[in-house]
Amino acid sequence: MVDLHCKSKVLSPNMSSKTPKISLTSNNSTSLPSLNLPFLTNSEISAAAPPLCAAYDHYLRLPELRTLWNARDFPNWTNEPILKPALQALEITFGLFSTVLSDPRPYANRREWNRRVESLATRQIEIISIICEDEEENPDTRGTAPTADLTTSETSTRSYSETSLLPRLATWYRSKDAAQRILLSVECQMRRCPYTLGLGEPNLAAKPSLMYDAVCRPNEVHELKTTPYDDRVENQENLTLHATHQIVESWIHALRKVLERVAAAIEGRRFDKAAEDCYTVERIWKLIAEVEDVHLMMDPGDFLRLKNQLSVGGETASFCFRSRDLVEVTKVCRDLRHSVPEILGVEVDPKGGPRIQEAAMRLYVAEKVSGAEKLHVLQAMQAIEAAMKRFFFAYKQVLAVVMGSSEANGNRVGVSRDGGDSLTHLFLEPTYFPSLDAAKTFVGYFWDNGNKWV
């Protein structure tokens, strides 16, 4: 049993000076609620068979992409391992935009395709700007980005990348309007950052420009546009499928690097920084889900023909589990729950007692002013859980729409030991933070049953 006392100093001037109290004791006139939480074991996930993962990597040319992601051209720039794959994913999106606009099929829904890809570019720019903004708020990373100061030259305030596709798309009559909107998105999203991306945005503030070509290497990125099967697969959806998954894999790599930074921040008890990075992780999960939604626009007949041409099928694991990195970051996100005791400053009771729950309740009610940073990081970690589970739920729905419900519900989606498919188990798992969940349940119960501040 727990007594949570909040000092009178946290009361507002309009409240009584009498010390308020929340008491979780057996003397309450109303009995405590029964918490019948499901006792389920988190299902273990694993990547598909090694040959299938190898074929997936080969199709997407991931070994070459990983070489680009891991290149350290600016060793003093802390954010390079995160921003490099993010910018390369953005550049691949520009390539996808060009592919969509050049689609020769008369039955393609070009208008909606254009809207979808433009939305993807805008969402990525938003996340990139957040990463850049957080970089400048940290004294350890401020000023380390490779930029060119335009004010020291006689050039105009408008800066351009020489090798990115976006400036060229801004001059093509088919893509001019959408590309100009993307450039305006860059201008708006980067306003809080001390530098801009250098993609041809107006740069009205004449800020330094990121050395985009040196960081992103657009020419090398576009060299990986072709697939190993182009010589025997004549299918327009081959180009869109290839680009879509390259975007996903690039952001998964960036996600993995952000998670490493989260772990380091928690270990160093820099909870404010950990919370910022956790919310970046949440945004990336939502972005990946939006990228996967692009599959809904693919022509059913062409996509299913491509599936047969690529010999995708016959395995017992869902296609997403061919991505080793996706499986890895999923496990890391789930394992964030192990850091809760360290954040709350308590040890796990070996007898199964409610130490963590009690500490969480104190944080939520009595210590949320002094412990705001801890509160923020716990909220952000639960936001990651929600976003990740939504991704896997949405992925199964995409499977059903694109390939038919019988395909999505049949043996082509991996079956777990509990009898259900692995995707379903991932988004139906019990909360990864049961102590935090129970703490909120009890605090909410007392407010709902007349245990008010007095």
Image (cartoon, rainbow, N blue to C red):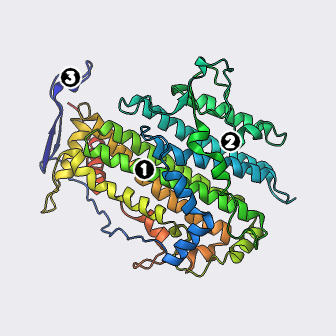
- Quarter containing the C terminus: top left
* Residue 355 on image: x %, y %: 16, 52
* Residue 185 on image: x %, y %: 64, 33
Q: Secondary structure at mark 1?
A: helix
Q: Is residue 403 visible?
A: yes
Figure disc tally? 3
Residue at 26% of width from left, 59% of height from top? 34
Would you say 146 lies left or right of 358 here? right
Q: Which residue is mark 1?
A: 257
Question: Answer yes or no: do the residues labelled 3 and 1 have beta carbons within 8 Å?
Answer: no
- For the residues carrying marks 3 and 2, which lies nearer the camera in this image? 2
**Dot 2 alpha-carbon crowd within 10 angstroms: few under 14, some 14 to 19, many 20 or more:** many
Identity, as a three-letter code, of the amino acid under mark 3: Ser
Of labels 3 and 2, earlier in sequence is 3
State the residue lying farthest toward the right: 106
* Residue 50 on image: x %, y %: 49, 76
Q: Quadrant of residue 183?
A: top right
Identity, as a three-letter code, of the amino acid under mark 2: Ser
Of labels 1 and 2, earlier in sequence is 2
**Label ID, residue 60:** none
**Label ID, residue 164:** 2
**Dot 1 alpha-carbon crowd within 10 angstroms: few under 14, some 14 to 19, many 20 or more:** some
Question: Answer yes or no: do the residues labelled 3 and 2 have beta carbons within 8 Å?
Answer: no
**Dot 3 alpha-carbon crowd within 10 angstroms: few under 14, some 14 to 19, many 20 or more:** few
Identity, as a three-letter code, of the amino acid under mark 1: Lys
